[in-house]
Amino acid sequence: MIEGEGQSRGLPAFERGTEWLRGVGASCDVVMSSRVRLARNLAGFVFQPKANDEQREDVLDRCRAQILAGGVHAKVMWIDLRRIEAMERSVLVERQLISAQLAAGKPAGGGSRRGSEKRPRGVAVGLPDERMSIMVNEEDHLRMQVIRSGLSLGEALDEVVRVDETLGSGLEYAFSARFGYLTCCPTNVGTGARFSVMMHLPGLRLTGEIEKVKRAADDMGLAVRGFHGEGSETAGDLYQLSNQTTLGKSEQVLLGEIEHEIVPRVVDYERHARRVLMERRRDVLEDQVQRAIGTGLHARLLATGEAMAVLSAIRLGAVLGVAEGVDQAAVNGLMLSVQPAHLQRVLGREMSQAERKVERATLVRAKLGEALGAG
Amino acid sequence: MLCARCGEREATIHEVVIDAQGNKAEEHLCEVCAAEAGLDANTQVPIGELISSFVVSGPGGEAQTAGSGRANATCPACGTTYGEFRRSGLLGCAGCYDAFEARLTPLLQRAHEGGTHHVGRSPREDAGEGADEDVARVAQLRRQLAEAVRSERYERAAQIQREIEELSGADEGGEHGA
C-alpha cells in the first residue's frame, strides 16, 4: 500500500490506460464505460457547507485511516490534494478519478473560494487499474466510485458495495430509516447511488437525432451530461447518462432500469443510426472519417475540442470498418493524451493555450501515424 | 423596490401571505432580511413555488428569488436555515432532514419520481449476521411503505412506519467499532 503523502510531488506513473478507455466489454462499440458512485456522510459530523477546516481535517483523518486500514482494494494510493500541484489535480480529473469540484476545493454551496486550495480533501485510488477511487470531502464526506469498461454496471455496483461495506465496518454513516443515506444535497439522498454510463454517440449526431435522444432520456428521468459530468460540455460525442432518482428505488431496481431498459435502447438507437449511415449515406460517413484522419495527420494546431471531434470520427470509422487499419486502442488512448493536463504532463512543462495547440497537433500527428501504420 | 424591512437593499422576494381568514397581504423583502429576519413559521408556503425555486437553485447555482420563501425555519443541530438551503440546494447536517422534513417531502417527491422513503441497502445490513431477519423484514416493510405512499394509502403507510420504527428501534444505538 502506498501512501502518497510525504512524497508530496508526483502521482503514480499511471502506466496502464484508464479503465474507461480500455474499450472492452459488453456493447463496447457504443458504451465506453460504466460507473457506480455512492455518496456517504459520517454520522455526528456536519456536512460540507457548515464545516470549518478543523472539522474537515477530522473527517479526512478518519476516512483516510479507514481507507488505508485495508480491504478496500489490493493496492491503494492516498493522495492529499492540498499537497499536489493544480496541474496534477487536473490529471486526476481527466482520468475521471476526482471531480473538478474536488480538484478546485470549491466550497459546496458556492461560498467564498478564498483558501480553497488548502481545504482538507483527498482521494484514494485503487492501483494499478484505477477502477476504484474514493473522494474525501467532496460535496459529501465520502464519494466512492468504481468504473468498469463497457456496459457493466452490475459488476461496478458489486465492487463499490464491497468498498462501502469495508469502510462502513469502521465508520458510522449518517443514515435514517426514512431517508436512507443522508447526503448534503437531497437529490442524492436514499441510496446515494449514481449509476452513469459513458456512451459514444457519433452516429446519432450525424443523423441529427441526438437532441431527440437527450429529450427521451430526460423523460425517462435520466440526466445527460458531457465528458466530465455535471456542467461539462460534450466533447468527442461522449455523453454520460445517469439516474436522477436515488430515493424510493433500491440499488438493484435503479441498476435494472438503466442497464437493462434505458441504456440498451440508446445503444440500439446509436447502432441503428450507424447502420443507416453505412447503408444510405456511406459517402457522408466515409467523408467524415477520412477528413478526420486528414486533419489528424496534417493539422498543425489543434484545440482540445477539435482533437476530440477528430478522434471521435476516427473511432467511429474504426468500429464500422470504414477506416482501415486503425488501431482502436491507440485512438482511445489519444482521447486522454490530448486533454490539457495530460498533454502538459507528457511534455513535462506548463504551456500556454497556444503552445498546447501546437503540441497537441504534433502528438496527434505522431500517434495517429503510428496507429494507422500499426494496423 | 426597496426592502420593506431594511429599506436599503433591493427587494427581490415578494410574498403574498393569505391568512386563515383569507386576507391577502403583500410583503417585499431583500434576500438578507427574508433569510435572516425570521418570518412567520405557521404560514404555509405554496408548494408549487417552493418546488420551482428548489429546482432552479441546483447545487452551486444562484437561487432564483421569484418564489415566495418562508426562510425562518432553522435546524436546531447545525443552525442552517431553510432559506440557506433554498439558496444553495445543500443541507447542513443529518439533522436538517428532520428539521425540514415537512418541507422537504414535496421536493423529494419531485426530485425522485414520487419517492419519499428509502428502499435499498442500509448500514445495518452490512453489520452482518445477528439481526438478519429483522433487517429483511424492515427492508420488506420499506418497500411496502413506498408502495403505500405511492398509492396514497396513508393510514396503511403510517401503520407500516410504526412497525419499522419498532423493529429499527429495538437495536438502535449500536456503536460501530474501529
Image (cartoon, coloured by chain):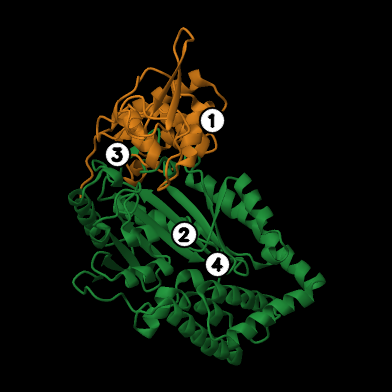
Q: CA distance from mark 4 to mark 3?
A: 36 Å
Which amino acid lies under the numbered mark 4 shown in the image of this protein?
Ala
Instruction: Give A60 or A185, whichever is nearer the viewer.
Output: A185
- In the picture of the structure, the residue carrying the numbered disc 1 is B147
- In the picture of the structure, the residue carrying the numbered disc 3 is B93
Q: Which mark is residue A235?
A: 4
Q: Earlier in the sequence, mark 3 or mark 1?
A: 3
Q: Which mark is residue A156?
A: 2
Q: Do circles 1 and 4 both sit on a common chain?
A: no
Circle 1 SS class: helix
Q: Do circles 4 and 3 both sit on a common chain?
A: no
- Residue A369 picture quarter: bottom right
- Residue A206 picture quarter: bottom right
Give the x, y percent position of residue A89.
Answer: 34, 68
Q: CA distance from mark 1 to mark 4?
A: 41 Å
Which residue shows up at 27% across the image and 45% down it?
A172
Residue B144 in view, yes or no: no
Colour orange, chain: B
In the picture as drawn, the residue positioned furthest to the right comes out as A280
Disc 2 crowd rating (10 Å Cα; few below 14, some 14-19, many 20+) is many
Disc 1 crowd rating (10 Å Cα; few below 14, some 14-19, many 20+) is some
Residues at badges 3 and 2 in contact (C-beta under 8 Å)?
A: no
Q: CA distance from mark 2 to mark 1?
A: 28 Å
Which amino acid lies under the numbered mark 3 shown in the image of this protein?
Cys
- Disc 1: host chain: B
Relative to A77, A210 lies left or right? right
> Which is in the foreground here, disc 1 or disc 4?
4
- Disc 2: host chain: A
Q: How many numbered marks have been drawn onto this rendered protein structure? A: 4
Colour green, chain: A
